[in-house]
Amino acid sequence: MEAQPQKHTVPTVSRICGDTVVELVYDAKVRTTALVVASEGRWRKAQEFAIATGETLVPYSAANNLIRHECVMLPSEPVDGGSKAELLRDIEAYLHRYVDLSPLFKRIAAHYVLLTWVFDAFNELPYLRLQGDYGTGKTRALITLGSIAYKGFFASGASTVSPIFHTLDTFGGTLVLDEADLRFSDKTADLVKILNNGTVKGLPILRTLQNRHKEFNPAAFNIFGPKIVAMRGTFKDQALESRFLTEYMDGRPLRPDIPIQLPNSLKVEAHALRNRLLHFRLANRFTIASDAARAITGIDPRLNQTALSLLSLIDDPSLREAFTANIRARQTQLTAERSRGTDVRTLTALKDLSEGSDRKSISLRELAERVNASGDVMDVSVSSRDVGQILRAHSIPLHKSHGIIVVPISGPTA
């Protein structure tokens, strides 16, 4: 009797197989997991699903720590959520009950939640950010939003970075990051890498792992996906800053209808919305795509890349117009901040190199190196050309000496 070939089983969280969507679900009441397999408008639960590659997909175990302790927020089954407009209305109502957001940001946030459930239909994504000091409601907003985002995974800037890499690579979904503005550390640098690379599909992060034989083996981690961040300040990297859609939590008095402490009803409502949002994903994943016609004219390409996926989901023309105005205002702000920050660093570096020096000139290359050395991991690097343009804008003369552009120094300063 011939031995039957063993199945090649693959524990699975999410998979797109041709025209079929496979998603992991978790029933917390009975502590079981299953796969939802959806195709052509129909879905079913399964404990295994064979695909054309010869693999058999199986659900992750309910005993997995991240699932068992609900560190990753999963739906339990698809539930028809009605029309897109009805679903958005109910998401907005849920947000309004538990957190105080500005009217425009509340609508943007509701669409962002929808975006998290179909994020893999796009090649570039924005991030959502709650910014403000202690006691302004950032963490409450983070919990409220993260509880209904696609596979929301809660972490803190003070967390060990390695599990964040592994969880994002394994589960995908939405990183919900609190206290994101730790500075001047290797941990911060790794978090910034996650945020910088996580906006664009196909930009994994390489990290060197060690196997049980103590052999080093580089591994690629996929960290692409939506992210919801709470922090007090900003990142100095202007390219990264341009990826955020930000609500400034200004510490205004809490609306009297908002509960002081988050009630148990939030968890119940969030679970019901996750089930409806799963149905939205299964029904719409293959019909949603980036709509280039909704790109904003006259703004930086990076900001357009940030905005376009969300604009592609917004059907209301008045909301698209308001969101477009918000993005234009953001560009004006970023341009002003970029100019001030780089200019100050450049002029300070020139002063430091000039004071007490008996040199006749300083090359733009040396000055650029000094500017870059004066920053930290979140500062944007500048080139010699950038430095030259800044100096000319401040009417500082430049000369050519031996084929290179230099800043002349009149002599030692007192």
Image (cartoon, helix red, strand yellow):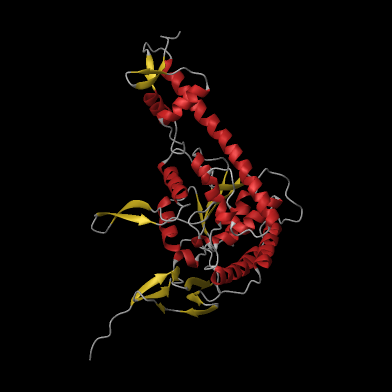
Percent x, y for residue 341?
52, 31
33 and 401: which one is in front?
401
Which is nearer the eye, 139 or 356? 356
- Is 19 left, or right, of 107 in this rendering? left
Single out the residue that lies furthest toward the bottom. Answer: 1
Quadrant of residue 359 within the rendered picture: top left
Specify the quadrant that holds the N terminus.
bottom left
| 399 relative to 25, above or below | above
* Vertical placement of residue 411 versus 314, above or below: above
Q: In this orientation, does residue 195 appear?
A: yes
> Does residue 408 appear left or right of residue 117 in this picture?
left
For the residue pair 83 and 48, the one nearer the viewer reads as 83
Q: Residue furthest right?
A: 256
Query: Seen in the image, is 70 located left or right of residue 323?
Result: left
Q: Is residue 47 above or below residue 334?
A: below
- Decide if residue 101 is in sight here: no
In the rendered view of the protein, which quadrant contains the C terminus? top left
Dividing the picture into quadrants, the one containing residue 189 is top left
x and y, in percent, of residue 266 in the image: 65, 63
The location of residue 39, given as percent across then percent down, is: 50, 77
Q: Nearer the viewer, residue 182 or 224?
A: 224
Spot occupied by residue 328 in the image (x, y as percentages of width and height): 62, 43
Residue under the point 46% across and 53% down:
200
Total of numbered circles in the picture? Answer: 0
